[in-house]
Each structure stands twice: as structure tokens, then as C-alpha cells.
């Protein structure tokens, strides 16, 4: 490939990191929005996360098999087509105002995102000089962080209306007036998601028309001694899978109910809360850079333990206080969550040798925690309050803390994954 074509390929693959980051981080906007438009309970609105994150569990292995058979380029193209198809389904879903229709659309989008994530990391490493592969990967991942910052900002501007009717206001409306109001709210997702779908289709066409190198899987030569024993016998790996399951659950819970929390605890309107969430995601991105630097001086398991304790304290502040203090506590949680996914990942697979690939797959599949814990949190919120429900991610951080303590003797790990 010429330098010009290589640059184009790098730009296109890097754009995938931005696209899936943007799509996933629209969920915290969709949760309060569809709760209002479709008149849902907190438990029902949490199914938005479930529809997205269950795809990572169900589609990851089929996506890998598809790409092994047809190649990474075909997998990326199919992933983008699924992504676009899912976004276009938002139009009829809003027309009918059917929540189940939205969930199907979100699952299709997430299935496409799963294929993109499966392919993008290895692809970006082979596009160019092997010595700069890590630099390219980190550069591409920074666009994922940029997307996390922009998604709630743009969602707040173009999807949320900032208008929430009280029960008294709703009861004062006629059935036709209420229906018209809810239809107007639902319709606000149509144009933004059509635009996203068109952009994704354009990227799919460019990917398909661009010559990309095929990744050749290297054959591993391993001894019988290296593969002896079941992967389930790797106690630290299994504990790491459990820790990652709880961590991703906590991460999704913290952001998904942030807008609802801001309204109930500090009386902040949904658009202002979306901007605050955007700032929280920015602190997450900054926290990852600072955390990576601190690991030069503090062993990763120890820093993970310290951050877990701090987050436990901040969650307690959010649960027990009111006003902006509680809001800022949750913004702080985002900062201290920043290093958790890659650190847990790296600690979980250390020393696995020939079992590293399957171990990595198990840790990635534990992302399904993002489908489980928001539903639990929504149920707790319906029974008690959204503020009390933040105890759920607090419990999750306890599991992360236990994993960090068990790994505290480890001096150095190589951080090789992010989410």
C-alpha cells in the first residue's frame, strides 16, 4: 500500500473507534428520554443497556468465526451495515412509539458495534510501521474517549427537549393532548439517528472500496505442558472475569441513571444534566492519562485498590447527600473508574501463556455485566428511589477492591485493553 492509501486506511479504521464510542454513550441520553416518551419505569428503561450489552455476550464469538471465514474487511463492512440498519429502525420505532421496537434496533446496532470492536484493534496495528503499532492503537482509542465526551453533549442538544411534565400536568391533559406530547418527544430521535445511519453507511462504502491488508493469523506452537489444565482452573483469571463483570456493571450504572439522578437530587433539568455527564466523561478520559502516569510510581493493583476505595466513598456521598455535592461525587467516580477496565484486564490474563487468547475472550465476554446491573439498579429505584439505587454500583466496587487486594503483590503489568 502507498503512504497515501495507508493514511486513508488508518483514518477509516480510527473512525470506527469514534463511531462505536458515540453510539454506546448515547444510551445515558436514551434512558431518560425513552422513559418519558414511552412512559416506562426505571426497571424498563434500564433494558436499553441490556439490549446493547447483551450483544457483546451473544455476538462476539459468531463475529470472530465470521471474520475467520470471510476476513476482517468483510466483518467490518457487515458490522457497519448492521449499525446503520439499527439506526434507521429508530424512525419507525418512534412513529409507533413502541419500546420493544427500540430495543430490537439497539440490539442490532450493538451487534454491529461488537463486530467493529472485534476487528478494529488488530487492524489498526497492521496498518503501517510495526514499531509504531502501539502508538497508533492509543491514538485510535483516544477518539473513543472523544466520542464519549461528545455523545451526551450532542444528545442533550438534539434529542432531549428539557420538558418534563409532572403527574399533575399529565392528568390535566386530554388523552389526545398527552398522546401528541409523547409522540413529539419520541420523534426527536428520528433525524439524529437517520444522520448517524447515513454517516455510518458512507464509512461502510469507503471501507469496502479501500484496499486493506488481510490479517494473517499466526500459528502458535505450544508444548503439551503449556496447555495442561482447564482454563477454569486459573483462579486469578476467573476472579478477574468476575471483577470485570461487576466493574462494567458499575460503569454503566453510574452513567445511565445520571440524568435522572441529577433531576431528583439537585433539580437539574435534563439538558443541563446531559452537559454535566459530558464533563464527567471528559474527566474519565483525563483520568486514564493521569492514572497511566501514576502507575510509573504506584503498582497497578495498589492503584486499583486505592481508586476502588475512593469510589466507594464517593458513591456513599452521592447516596447520603443532596444537591450539587452528590452530583460532583458521581463526576468524581468517573475519574477514578478510568483505569479500572484495562487494569483488571491486564491483571486477569497475566501468566496465562498459551491460554491467553481464551482468557482474554472470557474477560471481554464479562462486559455482559453492563446488561445485568442497570436492570437490578432500575428495580431498586422503582422500589425505593434513584438515589438509594446507587448502592448497586457501590457493591460492584467492593468486588473490584477484593480483586485488587488479591493481586497486590504484582509489581508490573502491561495495560493492553480499554473500554
Image (cartoon, grey):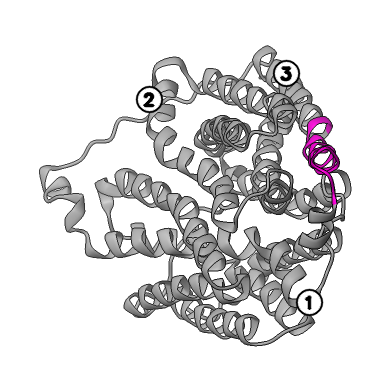
* Residue 69 shows up from this direction: yes
Task: Provide residue 353's location: percent of width, then percent of height.
Answer: 27, 51
Over which residues does the magenta segment extend? 173-191
Q: What distance separates the C-alpha of mark 2 from that of mark 3?
A: 24 Å
Residue that appears at 39% across and 65% down: 243
Q: Which of marks 1 and 2 is in front?
A: 1
Label disc, if present, on residue 206 of the rendered structure: 3
Which comes before the other along the chain, label 2 or label 3? 2
Q: In which quarter of the image is residue 63?
A: top left
Helix or strand or loop: what does disc 3 sit on? Answer: helix
User: Which numbered disc, 1 or 3, marks the residue that appears first in the sequence?
Assistant: 3
Q: Which type of secondary structure does the marked residue at label 2 adopt?
A: helix
* Location of residue 209 with respect to 160 vertically, above or below: above
Numbered mark located on residue 266 in the image: 1
Query: Going from the N terminus, do you reach mark 1 or mark 2 first?
Result: 2
Position of 79 compared to 184: left or right?
left
Pointer 2 residue: 65
Identify which residue is drawn at 62% across, 87% down.
320
Residue 394 pos. (x, y %): 50, 76
Within the magenta stretch, is there residue 395?
A: no
Query: Looking at the picture, how far across and down is residue 142, in whole percent?
Result: 70, 51
Q: How far apart are marks 1 and 3 (CA)?
A: 46 Å
Task: Count how many numbered circles sit on residues in the image.
Answer: 3
* Image spot of residue 121 (x, y percent): 55, 39
Residue density around tag 3, few if under 14, some if 14–19, many if 20 or more, within 10 Å: some
Q: Which of 190 and 40 is in front in this view?
A: 40
The numbered mark at residue 92 is none
* Cα gap from disc 1 to disc 2, whole angstroms: 48 Å
Q: Work out whether 118 lies above or below 361.
A: above
Q: In this view, does 219 lie above or below 411?
A: above
Q: Which residue lies furthest to the top in this view?
A: 209
Asked if 35 appears above or below 376 in the picture, the reply is above
Amino acid at each position: 500500500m502507498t503512504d497515501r492509501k495507508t493514511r486513508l486506511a488508518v483514518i477509516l479504521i480510527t473512525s470506527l473507534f469514534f463511531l462505536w464510542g458515540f453510539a454506546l454513550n448515547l444510551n445515558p441520553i436514551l434512558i431518560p428520554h425513552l422513559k418519558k416518551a414511552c412512559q416506562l419505569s426505571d426497571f424498563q428503561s434500564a433494558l436499553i443497556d441490556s439490549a446493547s450489552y447483551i450483544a457483546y455476550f451473544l455476538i462476539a464469538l459468531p463475529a470472530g468465526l465470521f471474520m475467520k471465514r470471510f476476513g476482517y474487511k468483510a466483518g467490518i463492512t457487515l458490522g457497519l451495515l448492521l449499525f446503520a440498519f439499527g439506526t434507521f429502525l429508530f424512525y419507525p420505532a418512534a412513529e409507533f412509539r413502541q419500546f420493544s421496537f427500540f430495543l430490537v434496533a439497539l440490539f442490532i446496532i450493538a451487534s454491529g458495534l461488537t463486530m467493529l470492536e472485534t476487528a478494529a484493534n488488530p487492524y489498526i496495528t497492521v496498518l503501517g510501521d510495526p514499531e509504531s503499532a502501539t502508538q497508533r492503537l492509543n491514538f485510535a482509542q483516544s477518539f473513543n474517549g472523544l466520542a464519549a465526551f461528545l455523545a451526551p453533549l450532542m444528545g442533550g442538544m438534539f434529542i432531549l427537549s428539557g420538558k418534563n411534565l409532572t403527574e399533575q400536568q399529565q392528568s390535566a391533559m386530554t388523552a389526545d393532548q398527552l398522546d401528541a406530547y409523547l409522540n413529539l418527544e419520541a420523534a426527536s430521535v428520528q433525524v439524529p439517528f437517520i444522520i448517524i445511519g447515513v454517516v455510518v453507511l458512507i464509512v461502510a462504502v469507503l471501507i469496502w472500496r479501500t484496499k486493506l491488508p488481510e490479517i494473517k493469523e499466526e500459528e502458535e506452537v505450544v508444548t503439551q505442558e503449556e496447555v495442561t489444565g482447564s482454563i477454569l482452573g486459573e483462579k486469578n483469571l476467573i476472579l478477574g472475569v468476575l471483577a470485570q463483570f461487576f466493574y462494567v456493571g458499575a460503569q454503566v450504572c453510574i452513567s445511565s441513571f445520571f440524568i435522572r439522578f441529577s433531576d431528583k437530587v439537585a433539580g437539574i433539568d435534563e439538558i443541563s444534566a446531559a452537559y454535566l455527564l459530558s464533563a464527567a466523561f471528559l474527566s474519565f478520559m483525563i483520568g486514564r492519562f493521569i492514572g497511566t502516569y501514576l502507575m510509573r510510581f504506584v503498582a497497578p493493583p495498589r492503584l486499583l485498590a486505592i481508586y476502588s476505595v475512593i469510589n466507594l466513598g464517593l458513591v456513599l456521598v452521592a447516596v447520603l447527600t443532596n444537591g450539587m455535592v452528590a452530583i460532583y461525587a458521581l463526576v468524581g467516580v468517573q475519574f477514578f473508574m478510568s483505569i479500572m477496565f484495562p487494569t483488571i484486564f491486564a491483571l486477569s490474563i497475566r501468566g496465562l501463556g498459551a491460554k491467553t487468547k481464551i482468557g482474554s475472550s472470557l474477560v471481554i465476554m464479562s462486559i455482559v455485566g453492563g446488561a445485568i446491573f442497570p436492570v437490578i439498579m432500575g428495580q431498586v429505584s422503582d422500589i425505593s428511589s434513584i438515589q438509594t439505587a446507587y448502592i448497586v454500583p457501590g457493591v460492584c466496587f467492593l468486588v473490584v477492591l477484593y480483586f485488587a487486594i488479591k493481586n497486590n503483590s504484582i509489581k508490573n503489568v502491561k495495560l493492553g485493553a480499554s473500554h
